[in-house]
Image (spheres, helix red, strand yellow):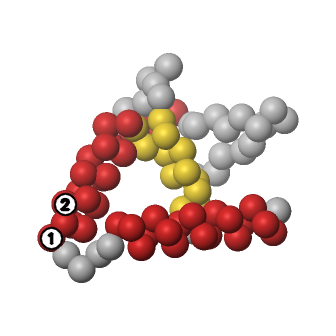
Amino acid sequence: MEVRIGSQGRIVLPKELREQLGATEGAVYQARVEEGRLVLETRDGLLRRMQLEIADALHGDRSLANELIAERREEARREATA
């Protein structure tokens, strides 16, 4: 489904997408760019995702500290090239 960015940087979500998301007027979403994609999620969805990631990290081979360091380095690299 195609969406366009307006002159003031606004994106209007078509009715079909709003219905799929359960989005109503005034709904608040967290936004991020992930691998070149715009990702929107509710605060509850973000919290659930973070809880699952932390649970996985506590029971697996992941290092949250190393992931955080890698994310910060990537952010610094992007800022330096901007």
x 19%, y 60%: residue: 55
| Rendered view: 38 above or below 81 | above
x 36%, y 45%: residue: 46
In-image side of 21 versus 73 (left or right): left
x 71%, y 34%: residue: 10
In-image side of 78 versus 55 (left or right): right
Residue 59 tag number: 1
Query: Type of residue at label 2?
Result: Ala
In-image side of 72 versus 63 (left or right): right
Q: Residue 54 at x, y = what percent?
A: 25, 59
| Rendered view: 11 above or below 2 | above
Q: Residues within 10 Å of mark 2 (few under 14, many from 20)?
A: few
In-image side of 49 versus 74 (left or right): left
| Quarter where residue 60 is shown | bottom left
Quick check: can you spot residue 36?
Answer: no
Quick check: can you spot residue 34?
Answer: yes
x 24%, y 51%: residue: 51
Residue where numbered disc 2 is placed:
55
Question: In front: 32, or 58?
Answer: 58
Q: In which quadrant will I find the C terminus?
A: bottom right
Query: Type of residue at label 1?
Result: His
Q: Look at the numbered disc 2 and give the secondary structure of its residue.
A: helix
Looking at this rendering, what residue extends furthest in the top direction?
A: 26
Q: Residue 7 at x, y = what percent?
A: 84, 35
Q: Residues within 10 Å of mark 1 (few under 14, many from 20)?
A: few
Q: Are circles 1 and 2 on residues that touch, CB within 8 Å?
A: yes
| Quarter where residue 76 is shown | bottom right
